[in-house]
Image (cartoon, rainbow, N blue to C red):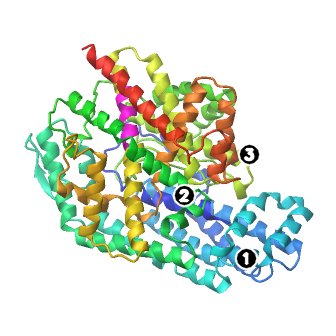
Amino acid sequence: MQKHLIASLLALAFAFPASGFAAHSNDTEAQRWNLTDLYANRAAWNADAKNLETQLVQLQKCSGHLGDKISSFKSCLDLNADILKRYARLATYASQFRDQDTGDNEGQDIAQNADIIGSKLEEASSFFRPEILKLGQKKIDAYLNQDKSLAAYRFGLHDILRGTQHTLDKKGEELIASFGMAMNAPAAVYSTLSNAEMPWPKVTLSDGQQVTIDQAAYTKYRASPNRADRKLVFDAFWGKWKEFERSYGVTFYEQLKRDAVYAKVRNYPDSLTHALDGNNIPRAVYDTLVDQTRANLPTLHRYFKLRAKMLGVQDLRYFDIYPQLVSGNFTYSIDDGVKLMLSSVKPLGDDYVNAMTKASTARWMDVYPRPRKRSGAYMSGVAYDVHPYILLNYNDDYESVSTLTHEWGHAMHSYLANKHQPFSTADYPIFTAEIASTTNEVLLLDHMLKIAKSDDERLLYLGSALENLRGTFFRQAMFADFEREVHARVDKGESLTGEGLTKIYGDTLKRYHGDKEGVMKIDDVYATEWAYIPHFYNRFYVFQYATSIAAGSMFADEILKSQAGASDNYLNILKAGGSAYPYDLVKKAGVDLASQAPYQAVFKRMNSIMDQIEAIVAKR
C-alpha cells in the first residue's frame, strides 16, 4: 500500500554527497526553505513520532481482523493511510533538516531515527498484503461496492490482488520485512567506502595547483579547458577506483545476489521482471528502450564527432566529454531564473503558471550552495498536507536555470497530484516523475531560443540541451543495458568479480562511444566507472530517466505545436498522481513507451539540435 511513498523517500539516498562550495553572497533566510511549515522544532517532531509509534501499536490490532466486518476493514485502511501520511511528513522534515547541513550531528540523528521508524512501519504493516489476498477479489469488490467511501483505496487494493502469486503468507511477509534493514548492507558499504574512506589521489595541475581528486574535485576538474589536466584527473581518479575494483565487485555482487533472491522468493523468473512488475510496466518498455538506443548509436556518435570538432581535437577521448562546448559571460540571478521559468511554461496554461508563480515565492526552496549543505538538486513532494520542497545549489549560470526549471516540474507534479488526489493515490512512481521535469526543460529551451540575442547565446542553450540528451538519455540507457546484462548473469547463477564487471561495462562503454568505429578511444582503466555509479544499488532505476525524456520530448513537441488537447493530456498525467499504472497513464495521454515512436522523437530532437549548432558554427 505504501510502495511509491517508500520508494520516493529512499530515492533521495542516492543523491550526491555533501557540497564543498563556499556560501553564496545572496544566501539569506528568504532564499532557504521554511521547515516550520512541517514542524515548529525537533520537540514537535519527536511528539509526532511518538504519535506514530502509538498508531503502530493500534495497527497491530488489525492483524488477523481485516475481514471481520466492513467497518473494521475501512477503519484499518484509514489508520494505515494516516500512519503513512504522518511518516511522510516526519521523514521529509528529517531528510531536509539533515541536508541543509550534513555536518550537523542533530541532522544525522533525526534522519537515522526516521529510518528506524520507517522500518518499524514496514514490519507493522506487513500483514496487509497477505490478509487482503486471503479475503480475495470477490469479498474486496463487495466491500468496495457496499461502501463508496472506500473508493480511494480501490486502485491500491486491486494492485495487491494483482500480485497474488508473488505475495507470501503472513509469516513470510513478516520475515521479509524484518530483514529490511539488514538487506541494505551493500548500498551502505558502497556509500561509506566511496564517500568517507577512499584515499583519494593528489595531482598537480598545469597551473601548479595541487588538488586532491575526490568525487567533488573530479566533477569540477574533469571539465577543465586544459586537455592535459583532464587526462591527468581521469587517470588518477579511475586509477584509484581500479585499486578497489575487487572490493566494489564483492559489494555490487552481493547486491545482485540479493535482488536475485528476492525475485526467486517472490516467484518471478528474473530480477528485471520483478522490478518492473512493481508498477506493472511491460518488459517491452525496457527492451525497446535498449534496442532502440543501440540501433540509433550513430546519432550519439554524430554528437561526439561534433564535440571533437568544436573542441578542436582530432582524437576524441573519454576525458573529452565534459568540457563545455560553449562558454560565455552569461549570468542569471535566481530572480532572473524564476522569471524565465515562468515565461517558458506559459503554454501549459494560466492555472499552471499562476500556481507556480505563487509557490515560487513561498520559501519552498533552499537555493544557494554553502559549506556542508548537500550537493546536487532534488524535489521532495510526499508531505501531503504541506507542500513540496526543493533543494538547489544555484550558481547563477544557465545550468542552474535549467535545474531550477527541472525541479519545479517535479514540484508542480506533486502539487497537482496532491490537489486532485486523496493521499492514498497522490504519490507517483519515478516512471512518470521525470516526465514532468523533462517537459519543463524542453519548454525552457524553446523559450530561451526565442529570446536569444546572439548566436553565442543560442549555442549556449543548444549545447546545454544536447549534453542533457547525452547524459540523461544515452548515458542512462547505457546504464540500463549494463544492468540488464549483469542481473541476468547472476539470476542464472553465474558469479561476477570486480574484474568481470569491469569487462562487461568496458564492452558496453566502448560500444556506446564508438570505440571500434574510431569515434572515441576508451582507455581500459576508465571501465571501472561501474563501481562509481550509486544508482546501481537501486535496481533498474535509471532506465526511467531515459523513458521519461523520451515521453517528455513528445509531449513538449505537441504542446508547443498547440495540438488539440495536448496540454490537457499532459496535465492529466500530473493530476492523476499514482491513481493508475504509470505506463497506462502515459499511453492514455498518447505516448506508448513500449513502441519505437517516443525514442525516435528523442533522436529526431537531438539531430535537430545538432543541425542548428552546425548551421551556427558554419557561419563562423
Work out how far the residue at label 1 is from the one at label 3, CA to CA, in angstroms: 27 Å
Dot 1: few (<14), some (14–19), or many (≥20) neighbours within 10 Å?
many
Work out how far the residue at label 1 is from the one at label 2, CA to CA, in angstroms: 36 Å
Q: Position of residue 363 (x, y in %)?
A: 56, 41
Residue pointed to by mark 1: 59
| Label 1 vs 3, first from the N-terminus | 1
**567 is higher (above) or lower (below) than 165:** above
Q: Quadrant of the C terminus?
A: top left
Q: Circle 2 — which element?
A: helix
465 is within the stretch colored magenta: yes
Dot 2: few (<14), some (14–19), or many (≥20) neighbours within 10 Å?
some
**Residue depth check, mark 1 versus mark 3: number of the one nearer the observer:** 3
Is residue 609 left or right of 614 when viewed as pictured? right
Residue pointed to by mark 3: 420
Residue pointed to by mark 2: 283
Is there a contact, CB below 8 Å, between mark 1 and mark 2?
no
Is residue 472 left or right of 230 when viewed as pictured? right
Q: Position of residue 321 (x, y in %)?
A: 26, 41
Q: Circle 3 — which element?
A: helix
Q: Circle 1 — which element?
A: helix
Which amino acid type is marked by label 1? Leu
Which amino acid type is marked by label 3? His
Query: Could you say which is closer to the camera, residue 210 or residue 22?
Result: 210
Residue 364 seen from this side: no
What residue span does the magenta drawing correspond to?
461-471
